[in-house]
Image (cartoon, rainbow, N blue to C red):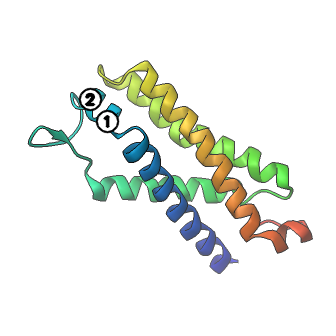
Amino acid sequence: MLGKFIKNWVISSISIIVLNYIYHVPMLGSYYQIHLAAIGHKVGEMAVPRYGELTFSLILFALAFTVMIGMSKTKGQYIVNGILAGLATYGGFAFLSRGLFENWGTWTMWSDTFFGVVCGIIVGAILMIVNKKDLEAGTTM
C-alpha cells in the first residue's frame, strides 16, 4: 500500500509541476511578469521564482491531491475529490495571497483558483487511469 501511495504521489507531483509550468509560463507568463513584479523575487528587472521553494510547495500540493483523491472509490469521486484538492490547495493559496499582498489582484486570485480546479480534474483523471484495477475492485489507494 505504501508503494502505491508513493507511486501516486510521484505521478501527482510530476503532473502538477508540468501543468503549473504550462499555465504559468507559456500561457500566462507575460501577465505574471507584469502583475507580480511588485511582490515577486527579482533577478535584475525580471520577476523570477525561487525554484527550490516553488518545487517543494508543488510537491506538498501533490501530497494533498494524493491523499484526497486516494479516498476515491468511483470515477466520479476521482474527479470530485480532484476538484476539492485543487480548491483546497490552489484556492487556499490564492485567497490567502490576496488577503496578504496588496498587489495580488482579484483576477490573479480567481485565475489561480480556476487553475486549481482544472489541475484537480486532470490529476484526478490521471490517477483514475493509473489506478484502474483499484477502481474496478472498488478499493482505495
x and y percentages locating residue 30 in the rendered image: 31, 35
For mark 2, give the secondary structure.
Answer: helix
Whether residue 141 is visible here, answered yes or no, is: no
**What amino acid type should be assigned to the residue bearing mark 1?**
Ser
The residue pinned by badge 1 equals 30
Nearest the camera: 120 or 21?
Answer: 21
* Drawn side of residue 120 relative to residue 91, left or right: right
Q: Residue at x 59, y 73 (%)?
A: 6
Seen in the picture, residue 67 relative to 104 is either above or below; the reply is below
Instruction: Indicate the quadrant containing the C terminus: top left, top right, bottom left or bottom right.
Output: bottom right
- Among the 4 quarters of the image, the one containing residue 51: bottom left
* Drawn side of residue 61 relative to residue 97, left or right: right
- CB within 8 Å, label 1 to label 2: yes
Seen in the picture, residue 68 relative to 83 is either above or below; the reply is below
For mark 1, give the secondary structure.
Answer: helix
Picture disc at residue 113: none
Picture disc at residue 34: 2
Q: Residue at x 27, y 35 (%)?
A: 33
Whether residue 72 is visible here, answered yes or no, is: yes
- Among the 4 quarters of the image, the one containing residue 35: top left
Q: Residue at x 38, y 21 (%)?
A: 105
Seen in the picture, residue 112 relative to 62 is either above or below; the reply is above
x and y percentages locating residue 53 in the rendered image: 31, 54
Distance (Cα) linking label 1 and label 2: 6 Å
